[in-house]
Image: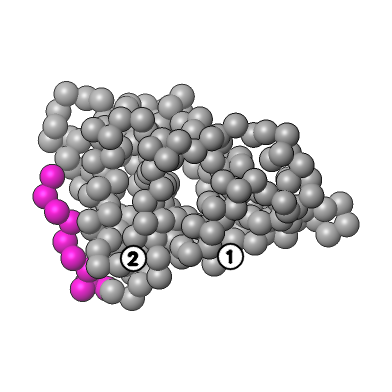
Amino acid sequence: MHTLLVTAHPDPRSLTHYVLGRLEAALQPGSVEIADLSEERFDPRFTPADRRAYHEGGNYPADVMAEHRRLERATDLVLVFPVYWWSMPALLKGWIDRVFVNGWAFEHSPASGLQPKLQNLTTHLLPIAGDDPGAYERHGYESALRTQIEHGIVDYCGSRRGSTAFIYQSEQLSPETTVRGVDHAVRTISEAIHARLGGGDRRPSPPAA
């Protein structure tokens, strides 16, 4: 069992990176790897080479193949990201556009239709939202985000749905609210992964904020 944590935030002092560190610690002693797309300078641009690879179902660019190898080692994937305009950051979306590609994440042809290929992967989401849960419920933002990612990406590629845990009010002035949200989200995701590991109640407690 191996967990890959993927994040996209340019500021290493951000709440996103703090949550990433908390989650990494909570998943110990399991095997954990971090993909910090901003620090690694992953190029999210979908190029003519990506387009050719998409249509051919192979001959992927070298940086895309490196991401494939990293994902192939993982049994669990966790996307940890700030919510920008009610969705994921462009860097993370570009990573998905380029990496979750035809011939690797799925196969599609007029003759055979859709064949998902990521059945061995469980995908979890940890979105960090600036607004409160009431706003997300009133306007349907959470439902829209879940539909876009859980159904439109995770289900489409055949990955199993893991846990989704929002952290709300990340830009509010109440540190107590933020700490409670972080604690709950980290606990939700780590417990789901530890349960898959068969660790049950033997998992370590998350560190204090």
User: Is 68 above or below relative to 88?
Assistant: below
User: Is 200 above or below relative to 87?
Assistant: below
Residue on which the image places disc 2: 31
Q: Name the residue located 18 percent from the left edge and 65 percent from the top edge.
A: 204
- Coordinates of residue 22 in the picture (x, y in percent): 23, 49
Tag nearer the camera, 1 or 2:
2
User: Is 115 above or below relative to 13?
Assistant: below
Q: Is residue 160 left or right of residue 83?
A: right
- Coordinates of residue 85 in the picture (x, y in percent): 46, 24
Residue on which the image places disc 1: 119
**Helix, strand or loop under label 2:** strand
Q: Is residue 82 left or right of residue 25?
A: right
Count of picture labels:
2
Q: Main secondary structure of the magenta part?
A: loop
Q: Name the residue located 59 percent from the left edge and 53 percent from the top edge.
A: 65
Quarter of the image that includes the C terminus: top left
* N-term mark: 1 or 2: 2
Q: Is residue 99 magenta?
A: no
Task: Give amino acid for label 2.
Answer: Ser
Q: Which residues are magenta?
A: 200-209
| Farthest right residue in view | 111
- Within 10 Å of disc 2 (Cα), the crowding (few <14, some 14-19, many 20+) is few
Q: Image quarter for residue 147?
A: top right
